[in-house]
Image: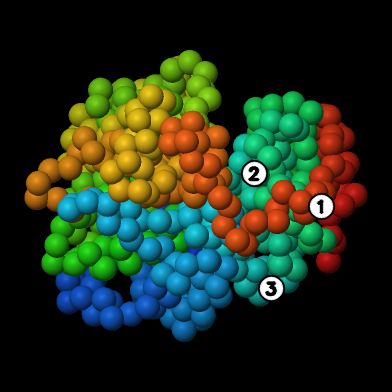
Amino acid sequence: MQYLSTRGGDAGRSFEDVLLAGLAPDGGLYVPEEWPSFPKGEWRGLRNLSWGGVAAMVMKPFVGDFLTGQELHALVEDAQATFHHAATTPLKQLDDALFLLELFHGPTLAFKDVAMQILARMMDIALMRRGQHVTIIGATSGDTGSAAIEAFRHSKRVSIFILHPHERVSPIQRRQMTTVDAPNVHNIAIEGDFDDCQALVKAMFNDAPFRQRMNLAGVNSINWARILAQVIYYATSALALGAPDRALCYVVPTGNFGDIFAGYVARQMGLPIDRLVVATNVNDILHRALTAGEYRVQGAVQPTTSPSMDIQVSSNFERLLFDALERDPARLRALMGQLGQSGGFSIPDDARAFIRQLFASGRADEEAVRATIRDIHEKTGEIVDPHTAVGLAVAREHIAPAHMVVSLATAHPAKFPDAVQAATGVRPALPAHLADIMEAEERFSVLPADLQKVEEFISANVQQA
Ligand SMILES: *Cc1c(COP(=O)(O)O)cnc(C)c1O
């Protein structure tokens, strides 16, 4: 399988190339040349396999000769071992037609662990073969940083530096990053806000001599390997609920459009997914785009109780648009140019029709999130986090009698104890493996929001081969 850039400036790349590159050099996102698909009979055969077995089969057509099926299987099982549930991503039935897909049993209690644990192991193999080291830098307001640190803490070929805004990350989220004791892990608390952290990371990537000297790499949600790894749980859950002989609808709490795009990939591969429902909080550019056809930035980001979905634009939407525009890079470039210059564009009619065949959307404001957490607790006894509640609030609007609905549970409620307690009166307890996190020793360096100071710190602390 070869990969090409959505903007038309790169093609013929291997899986290993796109795994290490992240973003394409022309600013586009990598997508496979074509969507592999399994006939129904083959999907039925997968019902008898373990989670790791399904994972290997689903990912194999995309990785080419990077790994054999057996190597993939072993890699996935090694990643699975970091999870604290025997089913890895269990389904929980809430009512007749509604299921929760729990993706938060990994080391940092959010769905990003699934893909990050797999990505880190793949990167290690690629770097080993190439005899290379990389420096991963990233900015985080919470989930991504801790998932990346946990995933790369044992890597011998990666140094990782995560910037977070000093004293502006919740204590649990900070401690998930700063209590990791590994020589290649570095936490930098920036005297500033999340935007300052992001601006510093961007400036470092734009500093070509620094980028080359440090061999910088990114692991944000545009990395194709992360999306691919997320296809696994669409497949395992659909098979468990009767696919390919029964159609399903998925509701996905959405920020950067990475997780739901994995659902699109699953459907391209032949799973009978009838509907993919985008669930947004009040930062609702996607909901507005899908209902009114205008993809347009509107004002500043509004902070909510589901901070991992507080976004202004959704980077991975570009991948869907590319298909919706019949894979014409010139049309895509024109729209992306308008987004950069004037903050938005109208989705052309043909593309809009393509998207609406499969996608629907809904939006939940803070009151709806609170009411949903409370109501789910009263009716089912389950405690859900605010991100999951955005999905459930939207799921309840979209349940049609003929449909089984799977709503993705993206974070553990104990990660957001204040919002959960405010809605239910119950303070969710951290799982046993994190019970001592509030006492463990923290390690981080406080630095000013100053590019030179941060670059000096990274140069001084990076592990050189
Ligand atoms: C990152 C994240 C999301 C959003 O996922 P995208 O792939 O960016 O759409 C939703 N919920 C939680 C808990 C997250 O960490």
Note whether residue 237 is visible. Answer: yes
Note whether 384 is above or below 345 in the view shown. Answer: below
Q: Residue at x 82, y 45 (%)?
A: 444
Amino acid on which disc 3 is placed = Met
For label 2, count other residues whose C-alpha is less than 10 Å away and answer few (under 14), some (14-19) or many (20+). some
Q: Looking at the rendering, which quadrant does residue 368 occupy? A: top left
* Image-based side of 371 in relation to 422, left or right: left
Q: Which one is in front in this view, the residue at disc 2 or the one at disc 3? A: 2
Query: Image check: 44 left or right of 112?
Result: left
Q: Which quadrant, please, contains the N terminus?
A: bottom left
- Callout 3 secondary element: helix
- Which of pointers 2 and 3 lies earlier in the amino acid sequence? 3
Q: Is mark 1 within 8 Å of ligand 1?
A: no
- Outermost residue to the left: 402
For the rendered model, the colour scheme is rainbow
Q: Amino acid at mark 1?
A: Glu
Query: Badges 3 and 1: C-beta atoms under 8 Å apart?
Result: no
| Residue occupied by mark 3 | 128
Residue hosting label 1: 441
Q: Secondary structure at mark 1?
A: loop
What element does badge 2 sit on? helix
- CA separation in Å, label 2 and label 1: 14 Å
Q: Residue at x 74, y 32 (%)?
A: 167
Whether label 2 touches label 3, CB < 8 Å: no
According to the picture, the residue beneath numbered tag 2 turns out to be 173
Residue 455: percent from left, percent from top: 83, 40
C-alpha distance separating marks 2 and 3: 31 Å
